[in-house]
């Protein structure tokens, strides 16, 4: 069904929505202020975010603006009645939809289903842009890597290297080929740059999670394959 994050400072409302969503089969996380909500979005690949606009501290519009700097997760805004300015600012800021409080829960559920359908079916290319191996998922469009749902922070070079190995899953790639592909033909460094970056990758995507996907082929190079 999907995992939904509710960012709403009124805990009673958040709790009510949570119960209804869980009853429908969604998994739910809650944050009671914008800053906590933003941190959760950075750390987890949610399928959808319900975002209240009137939040203490970091308000909903600002949270949305920051989310859009790194993620295109569907966002539905929860707005106060008649707050026309909020709606316009929110939709301009990249919200997918909004719903005005107080709302009927059936209405909210319908909006959620529509936003999720748009996400899954809207761009068929999107789905094919995720390369996976075991619990590791690399999104080539968002340039994001998740292992066991954890967002992994990689440098551009580390990401490109992992991407290249994944595109060539189960194929042994020589250090020279990796250098040519990732560093470019004119790279004058030593092939052990590849070994250094493989070590960086292992320390970020394998070791913290007990995952084993990158294998050294002695005297040749590297291969990424299922355990
Ligand atoms: Ca509020």
Image (spheres, grey):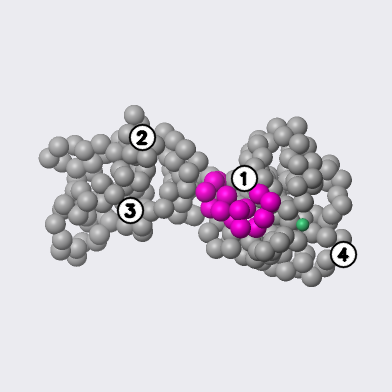
Q: Which mark is residue 158?
A: 3
Quadrant (top left, top right, bottom left, bottom right) of the C terminus: top left
Q: Which residue is mark 1?
A: 47
Q: Which residue is mark 4?
A: 82
Sequence-wise, the earlier of marks 1 and 4 is: 1
* Comparing labels 3 and 2, the label whose residue is closer to the camera: 2
Whether residue 80 can be seen here: yes
**Front one among 94 and 8:** 8
Quadrant (top left, top right, bottom left, bottom right) of the N terminus: top right
Q: Is mark 4 within 8 Å of ligand 1?
A: no
Sequence-wise, the earlier of marks 2 and 1 is: 1
How many other residues sit within 10 Å of disc 3, few (<14), some (14-19) or many (≥20)? Answer: some
Tell me the distance, in whole angstroms, between the alpha carbons under discs 1 and 4.
28 Å
Q: Which mark is residue 211?
A: 2
Sequence-wise, the earlier of marks 1 and 3 is: 1
* Comparing labels 2 and 1, the label whose residue is closer to the camera: 2
* Comparing labels 1 and 4, the label whose residue is closer to the camera: 4
Residue 145 in the image: state x and y as whole percent. Answer: 44, 48
How many other residues sit within 10 Å of disc 4, few (<14), some (14-19) or many (≥20)? Answer: few
């Amino acid at each position: 069904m999907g995992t939904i994050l509710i960012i709403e400072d009124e805990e009673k409302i958040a709790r009510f929505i949570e119960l209804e969503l869980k009853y429908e089969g969604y998994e739910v996380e809650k944050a009671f202020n914008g800053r906590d909500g933003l941190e959760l979005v950075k750390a987890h690949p949610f399928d959808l975010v319900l975002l209240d606009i009137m939040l203490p501290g970091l308000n909903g519009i600002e949270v949305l603006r920051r989310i859009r700097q790194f993620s295109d997760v569907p966002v539905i805004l929860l707005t106060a009645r008649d707050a026309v300015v909020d709606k316009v600012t929110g939709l301009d800021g990249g919200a997918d939809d909004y719903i005005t409080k107080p709302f009927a829960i059936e209405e909210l559920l319908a909006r959620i289903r529509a936003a999720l359908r748009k996400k899954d079916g809207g761009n068929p290319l999107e789905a094919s842009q995720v390369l996976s191996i075991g619990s590791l998922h690399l999104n080539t469009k968002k340039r994001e890597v998740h292992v066991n749902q954890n967002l992994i922070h990689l440098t551009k070079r580390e990401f490109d290297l992992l991407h290249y190995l994944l595109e060539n899953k189960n194929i042994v790639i020589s250090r020279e080929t990796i250098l040519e592909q990732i560093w470019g033909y004119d790279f004058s460094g030593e092939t052990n740059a590849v070994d250094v970056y493989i070590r960086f990758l292992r320390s970020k995507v394998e070791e913290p999670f007990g995952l084993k996907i990158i294998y050294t082929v002695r005297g040749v190079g590297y291969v990424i394959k299922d355990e």
